[in-house]
Image (cartoon, rainbow, N blue to C red):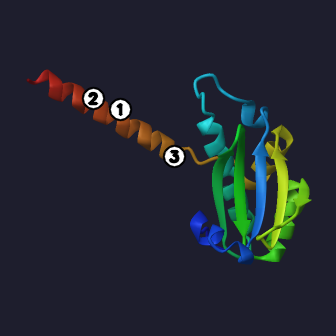
Amino acid sequence: MPRLAWTDLASSPGTAFLLVGELTPCFAGGKREDDPFDSARLRFAANLLVRTCSHLKLQGPFAVQPSREGNALVIQCAVTEAHDFARLAELMGGREIEASEWCGHRHFLLDDAKHEALLAIAGPPDGRGAGRRARAAARESDEQRYRWGQD
């Protein structure tokens, strides 16, 4: 099923189930010195969860949102179908939390073991876009350099 914008599911929590994964310090090789806000790891985790949901062929729509809660990096995943929630809960492990306004709520840790398990399902990230963006940035930089040299 299709991926939705986070606001579409988060605005009506009574119709969705929520899974919240907290990144551990060792997830995906740990924090890098050149990324003080850990944005790359957070984005990588969100993309990994999106690819996992896509490869599992969930029955209903889903949404994924990276977030920061205090000092913790978290990935929130909302699904609309109870069967999808059960499949993801079995895969992620963790513990059930009092659901409050959601139909169900589960919290799990994203550590190195979970990283490997999700990669086995989702496969490696598609790096084609990154190469394309890097080449476009290099071209723009070269063009900029030539423009300034002509004055």
- Is the residue 18 above or below the residue 1 in the image? above
Q: Amino acid at mark 2?
A: Asp
Nearer-N-terminus badge (2/3): 3
Q: SS class of the residue under badge 2?
A: helix
The residue at which mark 3 appears reads as: 128
Nearer-N-terminus badge (1/3): 3
Image quarter hosting the C terminus = top left
Q: CA distance from mark 1 to mark 3?
A: 16 Å
Residue 59 shows in this picture: no
Q: Amino acid at mark 1?
A: Ala
Label 3 Cα neighbours within 10 Å, binned few <14 / some 14-19 / many ≥20: few
Q: Residue at x 71, y 60 (%)?
A: 77
Q: CA distance from mark 2 to mark 3?
A: 21 Å
Which of the two discs, 1 and 3, sits closer to the camera? Answer: 1
Image quarter hosting the N terminus = bottom right
Q: Which of the 4 quarters of the picture holds residue 150? A: top left
Where is residue 127? Give x, y as percent.
56, 44
